[in-house]
Image: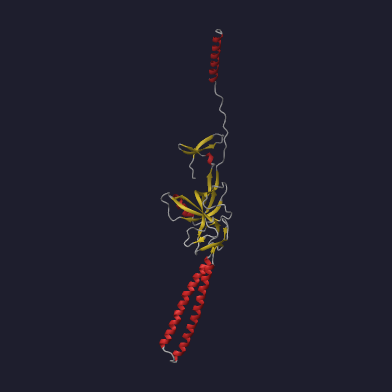
Amino acid sequence: MMDRRPFCFVAAVAAATSLLACGKTAPPPAQAVPVTVAKAEQRTVPYTLQANGTVEPMQTVQIEPQVGGIITKILFKEGDDVKEGQPLFEIDPRSYQASLSQAEAVVARDRAQLASANSDVSRYSALVDKNYVTSQQMEQVKTTAASMQATLAADEALAQQARLNYQYATIRSPISGRAGSLQVRVGYLAKVPATTPLVTINQIHPILVRFAVPAASLQRIRQYASATLPVSAHPASAPGTSSAGTLSFVDNAIDTTTGTILLKGTFENKDGALWPGEFVTASLQLFQQQNAIVVPTQAIVEGQNGDFLFVINADSTATQRAITIDR
């Protein structure tokens, strides 16, 4: 065992020396790294402003009763599309029907009394010319007729109010839109003023998208606002889809807190792709830039001295070239 120990050590040293000798050999030639190349092109490029936006209904109406009473019918379902003028609720109309009938009877009585008073005026006019009645009596008859005319006008106004109350017993939608969640059920006692809306109607055809862009873009927006500027909305809930609309509103003041200007786009939204309260990415196109030089975004490299890219020479070598990015 003792004689074999020095041999093993030398072998180990020899092996180590062999490894060191191998480490000092010349490195292999560098392998070429394959890269993807693309041509710079001239294209017509849209000048767009992008911002995060929120979808909001064109109109929102909270339905409230204008007369009190027990709700006897609900004529739609939650989430239904309703039309302008469509009946939504019915309030027990019997008391309002009775009030209307009474008011119409009073008006009929007033008209009969007025007709009699006008007849007296005509008869007394003929008699006063023959001195059969005095001028004082004639004036008294005219006063009575005028008083009856005023009474009739007042009672007609009361009858009109009674007619409106009877009509208000049927609650109709003032706009076309999508009905929300019902807040009441049949048997609910509607009060005026209402403590809670019966339902909320949102108009979603068309619909609005509100978004804000930096105030520095206001001058360009005003420059091209005379034309119909297209706006596209890309819902966060459906990547890859978009809806087309037009710019319909530019706020009249800059938000000094955020340094932005509020814009709104109108979308037909016939397919219902945009939903109130949804977050979207809005793109406003101001104009089309002709003959713009474009390169793939992946080709741009950010350096300490600015942006640059590599240009392929005729001999297949690459040269670094500084560039200035427009947008």
Q: Position of residue 135 (x, y in %)?
A: 41, 88
Q: How many marks?
A: 0
| Image vertical order of residue 51 relative to residue 313, above or below | below
Counting from the top left corner in percent of width and height, residue 274 is at 55, 52
* Horizontal and vertical percent position of residue 242: 56, 50
Residue at position x 54%, y 16% from top?
A: 16
Q: Report the coloring of the rendering.
A: secondary structure
x 48%, y 72%: residue: 158
Residue at the extreme right of the image, as rendered: 271
Q: Residue at x 52, y 74 (%)?
A: 104
Q: Is residue 113 above or below residue 26?
A: below
Vertical arrangement, residue 136 with respect to residue 278, above or below: below
Residue 130's image quarter? bottom left
The residue closer to the viewer here, 201 or 6, is 201
Residue 226 locus on image (x, y percent): 49, 57
226 up-or-down from 112: above or below: above
Assign the N terminus to one quadrant of the image.
Answer: top right
